[in-house]
């Protein structure tokens, strides 16, 4: 059985830039869409992620291609997602974990949907406890009739309603105030707030600072907080194959733009009846052209549209895409899985990542949600990004690394383990405070990986773009 690692002081968290290449059936693929003249592109542009020094410790694209050169093309044979990580305490198999979590999430997701309506003014947070078949709902004041009616049904899930000291909206307002001023350049002598997250019990905030926690408590924007705060020190986040996909594109494949390092594709989404592919917003600029891992003029995917919300780390690529993702690998043993839908995120949930460079990584537990975090590139701040989820690999193994940004974060279906549910897309990693040996390709010392990661909630992305997940 595994022992969950405590949330330790963070240091040098890195946004992992990732690209996954995938293949599969043409489920709900749209026609090719282009805007304007297709740009000329030198064939060597995508040969190596190291061509973009603005991103820290990027992957070597040439190495990734060599390792996966003999990997078969797009294969649609559904294979179970096999999790080999130690089973959490209270369970005898990951199948039991998945069944318990899906049952709890079915109730939690309905509560989250109510929370997004006027009835949700008092909503604080949800914490799941899969081993106990229970969720804890934190609510400020009395839950409305819609929530009480839901909880009165026989769902098979024990729901404990706890008093929340603050609503999610009240805590978010305080987070916005505390993160209004972007941190200065990364200097060892300057302690500053780099990120803020609600406590899982809605009792206050967790504040992350770049220096030590003791002096961090004396910072002006921490001392002026209107809610209780817990300060965690040494948090300095940094921006962080399934090598050559083709249309319709799948999640978990390598892609990039001229002059930028490689990233990973996320999930196919439908916007206004047209398919798009999700990616991490920090991977490109609005209006640029995306290319898959082939790296030639024939490998143009489509034009990029970034979210109108600069704090949401997400973008869309206008290209035919299907509701499947790559799993396994990279560089061998790859397969694809259909996407069944999407779920919300709650502390206590278990997820897997599936980046183009690290491959499928599981046994990752959600620690915090609704995190607002500033990241650093070359010592300069990027962000802050909000609506992030903070998660940790429970046994200290790799959860993700450079090259995985934008890649799928998933939950395995408990009934049909060949299907997956979308939870989010990969944003960054803690390369300094929790470094581990990398998995996948390349294995050079320049690549960084971590057991602690951040990712962007799929529910928030869909709300922002007004789209739906494409299922396979």
Image: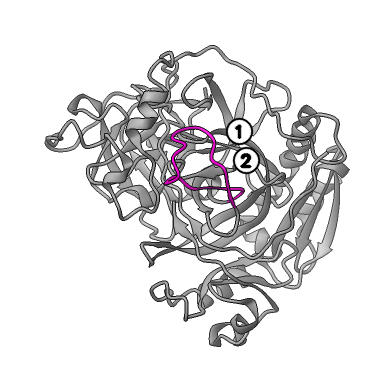
Q: Which residues are magenta?
A: 435-452
Q: Which residue does the numbered mark 1 point to in the structure image?
A: 421
Question: Distance of mark 2 from mark 1, alpha carbons?
Answer: 7 Å
Contact? badges 2 and 1 (CB < 8 Å): yes
8 relative to 427 in the view: left or right: right
**Mark 2 or 1 closer to N-term?**
2
Residue density around tag 1, few if under 14, some if 14–19, many if 20 or more, within 10 Å? many
3 relative to 237 in the view: left or right: right
The dominant secondary structure in magenta is loop
Residue 437 on the magenta segment: yes
Q: Position of residue 335 (x, y in %)?
A: 52, 19
SS state under label 2: loop
Q: Which residue does the numbered mark 2 point to in the structure image?
A: 343
Residue 349 on the magenta segment: no
SS state under label 1: strand
Query: Residue 275: in sight, yes or no?
Result: no
Looking at the picture, the colour scheme in use is one colour
Q: Position of residue 265 (x, y in %)?
A: 42, 36
Question: What residue is drawn where x is 61% and y is 65%?
Answer: 197
- Residue 412 is drawn in which quadrant? top right
Question: What residue is drawn where x is 76% and y is 30%?
Answer: 94
């Amino acid at each position: 059985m595994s022992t969950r690692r405590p949330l330790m002081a963070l240091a040098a968290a890195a946004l992992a830039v990732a690209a996954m290449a995938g293949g599969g059936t043409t489920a709900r693929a749209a026609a090719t869409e282009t805007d304007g003249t297709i740009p000329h592109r030198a064939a060597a542009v995508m040969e190596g992620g190291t061509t973009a020094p603005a991103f820290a410790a990027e992957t070597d694209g040439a190495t990734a291609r060599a390792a996966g050169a003999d990997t078969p093309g797009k294969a649609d044979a559904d294979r179970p997602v096999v999790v080999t990580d130690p089973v959490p305490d209270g369970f005898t198999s990951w199948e039991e974990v998945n069944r318990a979590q899906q049952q709890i999430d079915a109730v939690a997701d309905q509560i989250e949907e109510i929370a997004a309506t006027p009835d949700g003014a008092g909503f604080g947070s949800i914490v799941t406890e899969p081993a106990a078949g229970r969720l804890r709902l934190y609510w400020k004041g009395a839950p409305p009739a819609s929530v009480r009616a839901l909880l009165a049904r026989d769902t098979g899930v024990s729901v404990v309603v706890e008093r929340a000291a603050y609503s999610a909206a009240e805590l978010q307002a305080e987070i916005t105030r505390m993160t209004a001023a972007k941190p200065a350049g990364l200097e060892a002598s300057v302690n500053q707030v780099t990120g803020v997250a609600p406590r899982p019990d809605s009792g206050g905030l967790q504040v992350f600072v770049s220096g030590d926690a003791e002096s961090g408590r004396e910072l002006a924007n921490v001392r002026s907080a209107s809610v209780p705060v817990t300060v965690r020190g040494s948090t300095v986040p940094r921006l962080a194959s399934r090598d050559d996909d083709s249309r319709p594109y799948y999640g978990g494949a390598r892609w990039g733009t001229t002059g930028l390092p490689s990233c990973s594709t996320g999930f196919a989404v439908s916007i206004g009846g047209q398919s798009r592919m999700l990616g991490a917003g920090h991977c490109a600029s609005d209006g640029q052209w995306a290319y898959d891992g082939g790296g030639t003029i024939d490998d143009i995917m489509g034009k990029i549209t970034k979210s109108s919300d600069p704090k949401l780390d997400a973008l869309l690529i206008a290209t035919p895409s299907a509701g499947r993702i790559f799993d396994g690998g990279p560089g061998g043993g790859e397969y694809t899985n259909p996407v069944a839908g999407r779920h919300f995120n709650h502390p206590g949930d278990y997820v897997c990542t599936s980046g183009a460079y690290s491959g499928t990584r599981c046994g990752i537990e959600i620690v915090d949600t609704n995190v607002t975090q500033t990241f650093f590139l070359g010592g300069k701040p990027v962000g802050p990004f909000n609506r992030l989820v903070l998660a940790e690999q429970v046994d200290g193994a790799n959860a993700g690394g450079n090259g995985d940004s934008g890649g799928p974060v998933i939950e395995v279906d408990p009934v049909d383990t060949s299907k997956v549910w979308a939870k989010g897309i990969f944003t960054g990693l803690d390369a300094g405070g929790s470094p581990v040996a990398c998995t996948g390709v390349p294995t050079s010392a320049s690549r960084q990986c971590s057991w602690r990661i951040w990712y962007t909630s799929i529910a928030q992305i869909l709300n922002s773009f007004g789209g739906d997940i494409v299922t396979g």
